[in-house]
Each structure stands twice: as structure tokens, then as C-alpha cells.
Amino acid sequence: MPPDRADTAPTAPSAAVPADTPVSDAAPLAALGALRAPGVEQAEAALVEHYTRLVRLAYLVLPPSLGRNRRVLTAHALVQRSLPRGRTAAVAERSAIPAQSRTEGGGRGTTGAGRNPGYAYVRERVLRQALDAGRPLRRLARPRRAQLPPLLPHVWGLRLFPRSGGADELALDQRLSGLSGPARAAFALRGLELLTDEEVRRLLHAAGAEDTETALTEAAEAAERRIGTADPVELLRSPEFDPCSLQARPTDLMRRRQYGRAALAATAALLVCGTLLGLPGDGWGPDGDADPAYGRGAAVASALDPARVRRIAPAAWQTSARTDFSVWPARGPLAEDRALLGRALTAWAAPGASVQISATPATPSGPPMGSPQLLYAGKVDAARVVLFHDGLRVVRYAEPAAGGEGAAALDFVRVDGADAAAAGALVVGRSDGEVRYLTAPWVRGTSVRDLLDPAEPARPLRRDADGVTDPLASPAMARDCRSWDTLSVRDGTADTGAPDTGATDAHAPDPGATDRLLTDLGELTPARLTSGPPSAPGDVSAPADRAAWARTACLLPAMRSHGVRSVNSWPYARQPLPESNGTATWLCTRAETWRGPGSRVLAQFQAPSRTTAPGAVAARAEDSPACGVRESQVLAGVLWKSRGGTWYVLAAGSGKLGPVEVSGGVRGKAPGNLLAVRAAEGAQAELYGRSPDGTRVDALR
């Protein structure tokens, strides 16, 4: 084995450890536990606790031919109908719940839910009903309940569907639509539940699937073929497949009005002929559901008037107390094209069926709240692009520059609370694997820096007079991770002089400017990259920070299309390895979102290496305060093999965390924040530590 390489395997705290980064000769360090058959109370508790997870599973298994609105409602209905019918029924059905062994239900990296017999029972009921819903109706056979439209929940006047993802999510949805119901179930169970093939086989058989071997084969083939650079299994966690995070659109309004008028006429005739009761005096005319002209109609007309869009003066940012998108001037050669602005505003207020809409999570995609601010209008590559800002969102409208039948597109991104660093650039266009940025008026220079080559100097990047950069390779659209080009901007907010649109002096010595790194993660706003402790993250400038990011960059696809505002990588511990194998670095990488919730945290173990190969992901979590301003402490561990072939449990905590203790199949304790204990391959253990005040701190999960 080369001297700069050691084998690692991720470890989890009191559940199993996700095998996020495959490393040779590695084995997960799983936790111990035993479960009993559930009663109705336990099944109900499992359903409530893991409701969103079960609904996502049902949504993925249901046939796409139902349509997204009915799939959403049916998925919720199936989960809500999955409880036992009563206390006695639960006892009678316990035989249908398999006894939990050390590995059964746990899979390769399942969480505590996978070992909960109540959850296992409800999951089987959901899976059985979802498979039943996909069976064809037979003319003489009695339909099963799952094959009929659900009575509850029911929504009138609205169509509900998950938030739109990107092109990768659409490709995965099309791929899943070509699979059989059992194959979709196997794909979801392997990807979301992290079950082994044997566990999937048993669960499908218990749910009534017939040809489980074919289903497993189809699922494996679908999982092996990557979609662009994205892992299909990772895409399952996208908001595109989350039926609990929904968008609402009205049904066919014209048809509803026609039906309403017909029903109204029939009702009026019955009332006149039967009871001679007077009709209500208001609200029944053809315009009864509209506000007066001086109400909402006037406000909408004003918001849609291209002559009324707000235009900020070019030098406003130099004297404003705020330095964000609200002080960006109106730029672009088509900023005076009222026809283009009118089409963009109309598409925003009332998008037709041909307009493709995408929005970051928790970003409303409704009409403007008033006359928006114009940021840019111009031709970018093969499209005419308009960028608006309404105080909460940045909206990008794009239409084919050549005209014709091409579909227009609307992209929404949330930007409230932006500062000078977060408002440094916007993505103005993507094509052919490349991206162009529109930079802020205070940006004095731009360049390109490859994260995977920390020693390489930044490459100059030209901008035009409006601040639009030349194209650079987009890592969000790349098929592999051989390079990771980032946009380096020189922030000149400390200088009120005119911004430099050239690139020749982008990184010349300048004590009044700050260099920031921004990366494309598939959204309108690039994410800012930083390094350092959560209390004081700084820009990536030191050689050590660039070296750490070189081994972290290829983990960034896990944060794509998630509304990420910034990503901070914090080397929270350095650990001398046993047997003189060098010194490893522990990093905690945290992605903050524009909306607040939804943060993603990765604990990473970087063994000594002469290459920029990614480190091993020891643990990951969502919506966790770990490695953040509110809770900076973190603890993680891996099962690691030395060059001599000996396995160890390694763990590291941040700051003053300690002692650190491991129990279960491996026992050991260290007084400080670093632990190294000999272990057997495939050992099971539980890891935890103590804060200075004695509070127990569990490992990240």
C-alpha cells in the first residue's frame, strides 16, 4: 500500500454509518440494538415521526401515469391508511412483522427508523398499497381500495405538485417511469432506506410483489447509470420527489367558470320555480370574482407595465447604507426593450403552459408584489435574458433569441438578507457545460480558480461593460470531477471608485479589496465558499485552506439545487495516526441556505495523501445545528485500517470536547477530543463525548 494512503470507513453514532464515500477495505461501524414487535401505539408513533419519509416512498413507487397531483394526494392517503384498524388487529397482525435481527431492516446505512418494528410494519403496509395502486384494473374483478382515487385528503380548485427540480431530476423521473412498480420500489428501498438486496427481496415478497429478482435487476441497472454528474440515488432526496413540500396552481379557471355559471343557472331556476326566494344581489355576475378597477386590477396593471419597472442609478451603491441586490443598477443592451420586458413581466405574473418554471426550495413563484427592480436585460449566448429583483427574490426570464416556438423559462431564487458578499454575482446564462455571471457593480475584477489545483494561480476572466463575464466551465454541469472552476471576485466595496471591468488587475496587490470564491451549484445565486471556525469564517485565501478545499470540492454535488447560500469548511481537529501513519485532518463542511432551515453538514476524515482525492465522509446530517454559529461543537468517527493492516476506531471532537468514549463491540475512552482504539474489521460501536459542563454529545448523524 502506498505510504500516503490509508483505508477508512464511515462510522455513525447510535445508528448505522452511511457508506457515503466508498473506500477499499472499509467496513461500517454500526450500532447495536434489538427491537420488539409493535402495538398500535408504536405503529402510530412511527407513522407520525417518519411521515414525510413514508410519503416520499409511496410517491416514488406509485405509477407516474397517475399525474403528479393525484400521486401527491394518493401518497398521503396510503400512508394515512397504513395504521392497524384497532388494538386487536395490531396484535393479530404482529406475525406479519419479521423479527429484527442484527442486520435485518438496518441495511447498509439505515437510521434508527429502519430498526423500529413499528416503522417496518407501516412501511410494508405503505409499500403493499402503492404496488396495488399500480396494478391494472380488470373488468370483472373488484378493484382494490388503493386503485381508486382517494376520498381523503382531497383538494378543490387547486393542483398540488412537488417543487420543480433541475434537468437531472426530470431525467430521473423519466427513468423511473419506465420501470415496473416493484422495480421502482426496489430502487427507492435501496436508495432511501439503504436496504440490502436480500432485505429488499424479502420486503417486496411480503408486500405482494411477484418477480422480485427482475425488480432488483432493473433497480440496480437504473442506479448504476449516472445522470450527468449526479448520482441517481442522491437525486431521490431532491425536492422534486418530496410530496410534503408542495407548490399549488389553480385548475382550469375558464372551465371552472363555465361549470360555475351552468351550476348557477340551474340553481337559480330551481329556486325561482320551487321556492320563489330572492337571489343574492352580489357576486353572481361574470366578473363577480374580480376586484374593482381601483383595487387589485390597478395594482396588477401597474406591476406589469414595463415603463414602471424600478431602475437604480449606476452610482447608488457608493452612497447607500445597504450593499445588496437592491442597489444594483439596471444594465444590459436590451434594458430599454419594452416589448421584451413586457413579455417577461407577463410570463412572471401569469405563466402559460409552455413556460418552464423552477424555484429553489421555499421560494414562492407567484407574481410580483409590485413594480420590480430591473437588474439586467440583454442577449446571452442563444437567449434573451431579463433579471428582476422584488426585494425577496431574483427572477430570471429567458426566451430564445431567434424567436420561434422555443419555450421560455422562469427561474426563482430567494435572496432576502443578502449582503455584499452574497450579492457579488448572479448566474445570467448556462450553455454547453459553461456558465456566465453578471457581477455586482462593486466588483473590481474577476478570475477563475480551480479548487482541485490549489497551487495553480488564478486565471484572468474578462467581463464586458455591463459586468457579464466570459463563459467558464460549470462544475454543476460537469460529468466528472476532474476540475472544479470557481469564480474569484475582487470585492471593492471599501472603495467608492468606478468598478474595473477588465481582468488584468483582478488579483494585483490591493489593500482595499477582498477576494471571494463563488461556485455554481445549479442555481441563480452562486454559493460563497469560506474556511474557518463557524464564529468567524473567512475567505479561502491561505494555502492550507485551498489544500483542504481541494479534497472537499468533489463532495459539493451533494449540495446542488438546495438553495445554498454559503459553504464553510472548518478543519476542527488534527489527529496523529497510530503506527506512525502520519497526521489526519478532520473537517466539518456546512452548507447554509437562503431560507434558514435545510442546512447540510458533512464530517470528513482526510488521511495523509499526496493527491487531492476526496476524504472519507464520516457522517452527514440535515437541519442540524452542528458546525454552525449556534452549536460549533461536532464529533465524528471512522473505522480505519493502517498500512500494517490493523483496524482502528478513530474519532475526533472539536474544541474542548472530551472525554470521548466508544462502547458496544469496541470499548475505549480518551480524556481529550481525540480517540484511537484497536478494533476488528466490521466492528459495531457507539460513539459519544462530553462537553466541558458534562453534557453528553452524540456523534454527528
Image: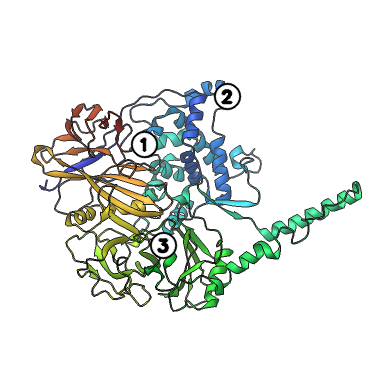
Amino acid type for the residue under numbered disc 3: Leu
Q: Which of the labelled discs sits on residue 524, or is there none? A: 3
Disc number for residue 86: 2
Q: Is residue 353 visible?
A: no
Q: Residues within 10 Å of mark 1 (few under 14, many from 20)?
A: many
Assess whether mark 3 and mark 2 are in contact (beta carbons under 8 angstroms): no
Please state which of residues 451 and 697 is positioned toward the viewer in this rendering.
Answer: 697
Work out how far the residue at label 1 is from the one at label 2, CA to CA, in angstroms: 29 Å
Please tell me which of labels 1 and 2 falls first in the chain: 2
Q: Is residue 376 left or right of residue 305?
A: left
How far apart are labels 3 and 1 at the CA level? 34 Å
Q: Nearer the viewer, residue 561 or 509?
A: 509
Q: How many numbered circles are shown?
A: 3
Rendered position, 448 above or below 339: above
**Location of residue 386 in the rendering, given as x and y in whole percent from the top left corner:** 47, 71
The kind of residue on which mark 2 rests is: Gly
Q: Quadrant of the C terminus?
A: top left
Residue pictured at 36% horizontal, 36% vertical = 110
Whether residue 2 can be seen here: yes
In this rendering, position of residue 547 left or right of residue 380? left
Q: Residues within 10 Å of mark 3 (few under 14, many from 20)?
A: many
Secondary element under disc 3, as helix, strand or loop, is: loop
N-terminal-most mark, 2 or 3: 2
| 401 w.r.t. 144: above or below | below
Residue 179 position, x and y percent, is: 46, 49
Q: As rendered, which of 291 and 27 lies closer to the eye?
A: 291
**Residue at image mark 1:** 110
Q: Quadrant of the N terminus?
A: top left
Callout in the foreground (2, 3): 3
